[in-house]
Amino acid sequence: MRKRIICAVLALLMTASFTACDEAMLEEWLSYEEETSAAESVDPSANEGREGPYEVVKVVDGDTIKLLIDGEKKNVRLIGIDTPESVHPDSDKNVPEGKTASDHTKELVGDSQLYIEYGTEPADRYGRPLCYVYLPDGTMLNEKILSDGYAKVLIVGKNKEYKDRFNEIQEEAKAEGRGLWPTGVFDE
């Protein structure tokens, strides 16, 4: 990505020498390149002590991500959150808001390498790893989805590490009407 931006700037510079390109446009391109470089840089200690990074194979739905862990593709369930259904085997349980939540998770994850922190109970009854998932910059994905209003809190079993924090985040998202809260999908 950086190489493409540099090439574009060089092309712009060459064009500027042959046309009446103003300095403001050139400065805009150069500042864009600096902002992009800053956004791409990540503090390497942001995920210290967590496992990973792991490649994202697929976003299954809003609260489940398939990661390549130790050479094996595993559906990782995000602890403490529940998004509306979008790929449930019983199609009657799938709702349009589920697709919206899934798309939001895809947007957040992008093509990132993710880090994980296992919960007290490391797997659910289906054998899926139960994890708190982190983006390269150290942001907890579980919290971000809650904060953006695309999930509600769901605490199951002993995985209560961030229960209070999650409840606070949910209440704020609900009060501000973020994401899916205005649809009433979480009222059921």
Image (cartoon, grey):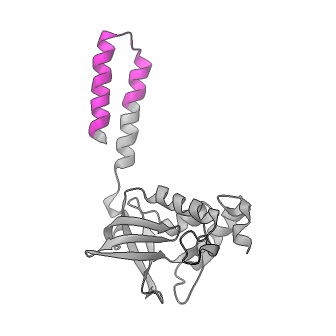
Q: Give the quarter of the image for residue 25.
A: top left
Whether the magenta-drawn stretch holds residue 54 is answered as no
**Does residue 175 lie above or below 11 as drawn?**
below
Q: Quadrant of residue 180?
A: bottom right
Q: Does residue 101 appear left or right of residue 35 in this picture?
A: right
For this rendering, which residue is in front, 120 or 12? 12
Query: Magenta residues, as a range?
Result: 3-30
Where is residue 183 drawn, in percent x and y?
Answer: 72, 61
Number of callouts: 0
Residue drawn where x is 46% and y is 87% of the image: 126
Q: Quadrant of the C terminus?
A: bottom right
Q: In this image, 130 relative to 88: left or right? A: left
Q: Main secondary structure of the magenta part?
A: helix
Q: Position of residue 114 (x, y in %)?
A: 37, 65
Q: Residue at x 63, y 63 (%)?
A: 97
Q: Is residue 135 above or below residue 26?
A: below
Residue 42: image location, x then y, percent: 35, 54
The answer to which of 117 and 150 lies nearer the viewer is: 150
* Residue name at image x 36 percent, y 76 percent: 74
- Quarter of the picture containing the N terminus is top left
The residue nearer to you, when weighing 165 against 153, is 153
Residue 29, magenta (yes or no): yes
Q: Position of residue 50 (x, y in %)?
A: 35, 73
